Image (cartoon, rainbow, N blue to C red):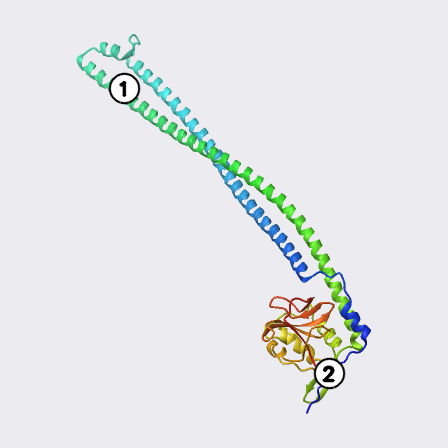
Amino acid sequence: MHKRILSTIVAASVVLSIGTTALATPSQEQLNQSKTNLSQAEQKVQDLNTQIQKLDSQIETTMRQKNDIDNQITKIQKNIKNVQASITDTQNKISTEQKLYSDRIRAMYMNGKNEGYLGILLDSKSFGELISNVEAIKRITDYDKNLVSNLNDAKAKVESEKQKLSDQKTKLVSLNAENAKKISDLQTNKAKAVALSNQAEDEVAKNKSVFDKLQAQADAEKKTLLAQATTASTSTSTFVSHDRGGITVTNAANVIQFAAQFADKVPYVYGGTSPSPGFDCSGFVQYCYARFGVNLPRTTGEQVHVGTTVSSLQPGDLLFFGSASAPYHVAMYVGNNMMIEAPRTGEDVHITPVRGYSIAKRVN
């Protein structure tokens, strides 16, 4: 029958040092709040930078639209100029045709004594010549009327086109005035966003400074604890495991020192029992104790039934969270109100201040 050996305390001064040293260590709540403040400030900067990027895109798009409209206005102005030239040309043609019309009338009266249609008709020498002159005058006047009418129609059409172009130009100019105002408003909003972003970046710097200071204090505490654990490695609480090969004795400081090498390096992995790919909480505890011959059950619910319940903590004690009879998480006490754990998905093994546990067990 296996004998059960109770733990003994040696090197009391070392253990006392580990248990009573109190550094100005920030609480986990302080670290979490500082980290939250930093994350919120960083998110604010990111949101403002996203807003600035959107404003830049809107400014660029509006400026491109404005430039396109400017090009359209230039093209329309050129067309108006061409149309105006066409109107002037048509007006010149009308004047030329009116002059030709008068010249033809004069040419019909060879002696030049009479002017106009009536004179030509009165100078007719016979009835036949009268009829002939009437028909000739009619043809000439009809032709000239049609020609002038066509020219006037062409002139009216061109003037109508000019008016349409002018109307289009007016609308485009009005639209570009709106675009110019929109660009001005966007640039004003961008300037405000940039100012807010600069302020937010200042807040990030301040929050980062606070967080870095708190983190540095926490890291310094971890180093102190590890140094204390190393100092205590030669003499501290001892444990006995009942293995098939017999009784194996090891010490708590060695377990903690061994566990600490995985801090901030090995991730939490559900169901994990080794450094690669990672540990879950109970797998981490089992692995560290097994390294020194202490065989613990696999799950948190089984580990809570091992050892002796204690109220005064020593390095190596197991801390359970949740129901004392059916806990959901386990960690190892390091000393100085700190513990080491494989916390949860997305985080690495880390040393952190002790929080509200339900029961503590000392392996024996």
Look at discs 1 and 2 and give the one toward the viewer: 2
Taking the image as drawn, is residue 277 in sight?
Answer: no
Which corner quadrant of the image does residue 115 belong to?
top left
Left or right for 132, reference 101: left
The answer to whether residue 255 is left or right of residue 104 is right
How would you rate the neighbour count of disc 2 (Cα within 10 Å): few for under 14, some for 14-19, many for 20 or more? few
Residue 239 visible? The answer is: yes
Image point (58%, 42%), residue name: 190
How many numbered callouts?
2
Q: Residue furthest front?
A: 311
Looking at the rendered image, the quarter that the N terminus falls into is: bottom right
Q: Are marks 1 and 2 in contact (CB under 8 Å)?
A: no
Task: Name the quadrant containing residue 330.
Answer: bottom right
Q: Residue at x 55, y 37 (%)?
A: 184
* Residue located beneath label 1 in the image: 141
Can you say which quadrant of the picture contains the C terminus?
A: bottom right
Residue 18: assigned label? none
Front residue of 236 and 173: 236
**Outermost residue to the bottom:** 1
Query: The residue tagged with tag 2: helix, strand or loop?
Result: loop
- Point out residue 317 in the picture as x, y percentages from the top left corner: 70, 75
Q: Amino acid at mark 2?
A: Leu
Residue pointed to by mark 2 = 6
Among numbered discs 1 and 2, the one appearing first in the sequence? 2
Point 70% across, 71% down: residue: 333
Locate residue 247, reporting x and y percent.
72, 87
Three-letter code, disc 1: Thr
User: Alpha-carbon neighbours of circle 1 within 10 Å: few (<14), some, or many (≥20)?
Assistant: some
As displayed, is residue 133 above or below residue 334?
Answer: above
